[in-house]
Image (cartoon, rainbow, N blue to C red):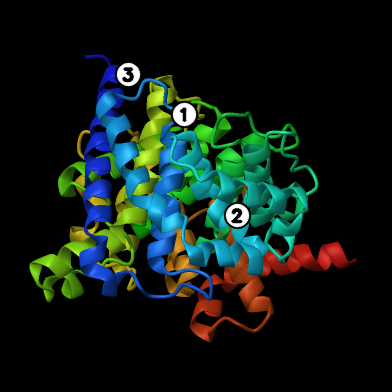
Amino acid sequence: MTEKGSVGNQAAAFLRSSLDIAVNGLKRLDENTPFWSEAIDEYASIQDKLVVESLLLVLILMRFKERSSGVQQRLQEICEFCAPQVYTPRNRMLLGRYPHTAVTFGISHLALSRMGYGDPAFGRTLEAIFRSQQAYGIERLPYRVMEVRWLHASLLGDRPAQFDDLLPASMLQVQAHPLRMSISDSYALTHALMYVTDFGDHPPPVDLNISRLESIIDQLLAVQIVNENLDVLGELLMSVMFLGRPWSVRARFAWRFLSETWGQYGFLPSPSFETPEYARLNAKDAQAYAFKHTYHTLYVGVILCSLVLRRPEALTITPVDHPESEYMPLNRVIQRMDACPSLRGLSSCQWTKVISGLSIERAALSNLLFDGLAAHAAQQYDLLTLCGLIEGLSPRERSASDMPREIETFLFTQWDSAGLPPEIADRIAPTVIGRHASAQAIAVD
């Protein structure tokens, strides 16, 4: 079997089994209402969020023309369950009282309508709200405004969505570095790409620096491999597909990491899943708890698989990455990881279980783990780990490579604002502080 065929078969198998989990989980909701009644805000509960995300899943999978009859049947079952949850008196009231909720209901209605389960009267109300601009009547972050415009164009189809005015303020163009980016920043980047590319159906806007975005996504993939956050990892791999370029060495490693984990557990664990909490529940409640805390990661994986099935060649074209030289030897990076107090120890790290047999060069793996550990340590404000990562690197290595250079700047900034403990300042004083202080003085002169 060719590599292309192997990847495609794997993605198809994951997609089918995960849709089975989704449908079975939805059908059990009424038996487990305490797990789903928690309010997210004044407009929606967790169950409402699940319904919207289930129908977004349907909307994206409908684009995969080669879907099997079994997959089509599962999509219909999701719609049959969700339609009565969407077209309710309460939701009709919310549309009139809070027109901005048209975005939430619009995604659901769009999927239901395209599958033949729509409510025409509900649809007319939604269209009137978008045509009158009332759907925009609440302050939103740039990527959320992109979502409204994407949905507006999808529902009405009278004009293409325009995003040019939003790009400069979005994570797609602001000057951000993965060392300092939060989970929310990564989320904003991945979702902005969803909407500006219409989930991969359109090329990215011409104003975007694709090479820069590829580099950022590569480093963020490293971060989420070290953090073992499969939710964000899957969305980042979706972003790779939206950019329309061949997968990098890191993206291939991330796919292998995600797919090996998926195969091992039969689902994709999420950051919010707590094993002790799961273990104390009875069998019925444990099922509900597991679905509540894994469905989003599972849905991300399903959408990713549908994208892979639409473009399986993206994973089989030879990577275009330039040959790498390692920042530091792999064994030293792993020692730093083992000593990092906020990681659980290498023996329990999932990524250590998928290294054997991987077609990734030692230097590439070393740099991937270096980048991931650096950003993880910065998120934890673990200055000792950051200090240890650049100790032993020559000034040329620290200034020539992106992540070591950024760690230096990070530490110098903390020192310059009197934020470094003396023991850290003393360790980096001969190199980092002296060189950066001199450069700063020259710039002022």
What residue is shown with label 3? 4
Q: Secondary structure at mark 1?
A: loop
Callout 2 crowding tier (Cα within 10 Å): few <14, some 14–19, many ≥20: many
Q: Residue furthest top?
A: 1
- Amino acid at dot 1: Arg
Taking depth in this image into account, of 312 and 36 the one nearest to the observer is 36
Q: Residue at x 35, y 40 (%)?
A: 302
Q: Quadrant of residue 64?
A: top left
Callout 1 crowding tier (Cα within 10 Å): few <14, some 14–19, many ≥20: some
Q: Secondary structure at mark 2?
A: helix
Residue 250 seen by the camera: no
Of labels 2 and 3, earlier in sequence is: 3
What residue is shown with label 1? 63
What residue is shown with label 2? 103
Q: Residue at x 52, y 46 (%)?
A: 109
Q: Residue at x 50, y 62 (%)?
A: 183
Q: CA distance from mark 1 to mark 2?
A: 21 Å
Tell me: 134 left or right of 44.
Answer: right
Q: Quadrant of residue 282?
A: bottom left
Q: Give the quadrant of the N terminus.
A: top left
Q: Give the quadrant of the C terminus.
A: bottom right
Of labels 1 and 2, earlier in sequence is: 1
Residue 378 x, y percent position in the rendering: 50, 67
- Amino acid at dot 2: Val
Q: Residue furthest left?
A: 283
Taking depth in this image into account, of 341 and 310 the one nearest to the observer is 310
Q: Residue at x 57, y 33 (%)?
A: 243
Nearer to us: label 2 or label 3? 2
Taking depth in this image into account, of 291 and 362 the one nearest to the observer is 291
Of labels 3 and 1, earlier in sequence is: 3
Q: CA distance from mark 3 to mark 1?
A: 20 Å
Nearer to us: label 1 or label 2? 2
